[in-house]
């Protein structure tokens, strides 16, 4: 019955919904009569009715006990009030869980950028993938601390010891980029640093796997292009 299914959606058990609709259709009934009309096993009827009484939808009286449902408008009012209470609770509590999952992005400046780069490099266990316009000596020294797979794309990537290096070959552009170390690095597919290093040093740092995945998707086409170019030149 469709009504039974709808009542179940509002927290009634199958037996409770069947008992309540039986009472509404027949009026006052005994446990035996409820069992016959609703199909609820006689051994379960009293438990079901006690539950409906405790929830305020049914009244019980007399010996032997008789049961009577509230009027339909009263039942609807109780359900509506409880649904509204639940909605208010959800409105209050649900954002707390959402805010706990917000991916935090931080901005670092000056020496803190290199400190964060060092922290991420030393803690990386699987891989570091990066693309930097030009790798300055201070950045190079930190990246050489890596104890994992290190894949770098840059005008001077081959100067970094133990790196799988892929270099841009337009030397005239390299001179323009020597004053800058701009690009991105992804650590273990979890942490990301977007670096802007020139006269001033700034980095956007994330520990979100989602942002790391986005950064890798940006890096991969360039990496594949450089690999293909090197293969064709051989």
Image: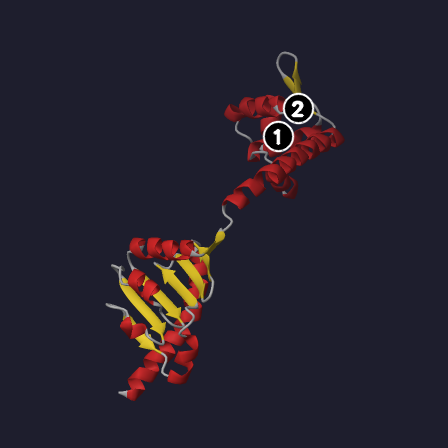
**Residue lying at 61% horizontally and 35% vertically, measured from the top left:** 89
Does residue 220 sit above or below 3 in this rendering? below
For residue 58, the mark is: 2
In the figure, 94 relative to 75: above or below? below
- Residue at (34% x, 82% y) in the render: 228
Say whether residue 119 is left or right of residue 6.
Answer: left
Q: Tell me the quarter of the picture where residue 35 sits.
A: top right
> Where is residue 177 drawn, in percent x and y?
42, 75
Q: Nearer the viewer, residue 230 or 54?
A: 230
Q: Which residue is mark 1?
A: 19
Please tell me whether residue 10 is drawn above or below residue 192 in the rendered image: above
Q: Nearer the viewer, residue 77 or 211?
A: 211
Judge the density around disc 2: few (<14), some (14-19), many (≥20) Cα neighbours within 10 Å.
Answer: many
Q: Residues within 10 Å of mark 1 (few under 14, many from 20)?
A: many
Among the two numbered marks 1 and 2 on one chain, the one whose residue lies closer to the N terminus: 1
Give 165 or 182, whichever is nearer the viewer.
Answer: 182
Q: Nearer the viewer, mark 1 or mark 2?
A: 2
Q: Disc count in the image?
A: 2
Give the SS element for disc 1.
helix
Spatial CA span between label 1 and label 2: 10 Å
- Which residue is depicted at the point 29% across and 62% down? 141
- At horizontal 65% and vertical 36% (from top left) the residue drawn is 88
Image quadrant occupied by the C terminus: bottom left
Q: Is residue 196 above or below residue 3?
A: below
Q: Could you tell me residue 148's position as x and y percent?
A: 26, 60
Q: Do residues under tags 1 and 2 come within 8 Å of each other at their CB atoms?
A: yes
Task: Report the residue that reaches farthest toward the front.
Answer: 199
Q: Quadrant of residue 5?
A: top right
């Amino acid at each position: 019955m469709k009504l039974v299914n709808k009542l179940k959606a509002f927290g009634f058990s199958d037996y409770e919904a069947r008992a309540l609709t039986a009472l509404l259709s027949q009026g006052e009934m005994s446990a035996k009569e409820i069992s016959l009309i609703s199909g609820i096993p006689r051994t379960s009827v009293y438990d079901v009715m006690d539950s409906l009484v405790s929830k305020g939808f049914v009244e019980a009286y007399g010996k032997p006990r008789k049961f009577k449902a509230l009027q339909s408008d009263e039942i609807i009012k109780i359900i509506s009030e409880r649904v509204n209470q639940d909605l208010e609770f959800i409105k209050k509590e649900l954002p707390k869980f959402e805010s706990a999952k917000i991916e935090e992005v931080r901005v670092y400046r000056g020496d803190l950028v290199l400190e964060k780069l060092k922290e991420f490099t030393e803690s990386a266990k699987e891989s570091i993938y990066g693309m930097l316009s030009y790798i300055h000596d201070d950045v190079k020294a930190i990246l050489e601390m890596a104890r994992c797979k290190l894949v770098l794309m840059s005008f001077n990537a081959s100067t970094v010891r133990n790196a799988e290096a892929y270099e841009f070959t337009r030397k005239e552009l390299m001179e323009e980029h020597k004053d800058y170390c701009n690009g991105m690095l992804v650590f273990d597919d979890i942490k990301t640093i977007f670096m802007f290093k020139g006269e001033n040093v700034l980095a956007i740092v994330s520990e979100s796997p989602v942002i790391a995945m986005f950064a890798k998707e940006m890096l991969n086409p360039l990496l594949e292009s450089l690999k293909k170019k090197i293969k064709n030149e051989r």
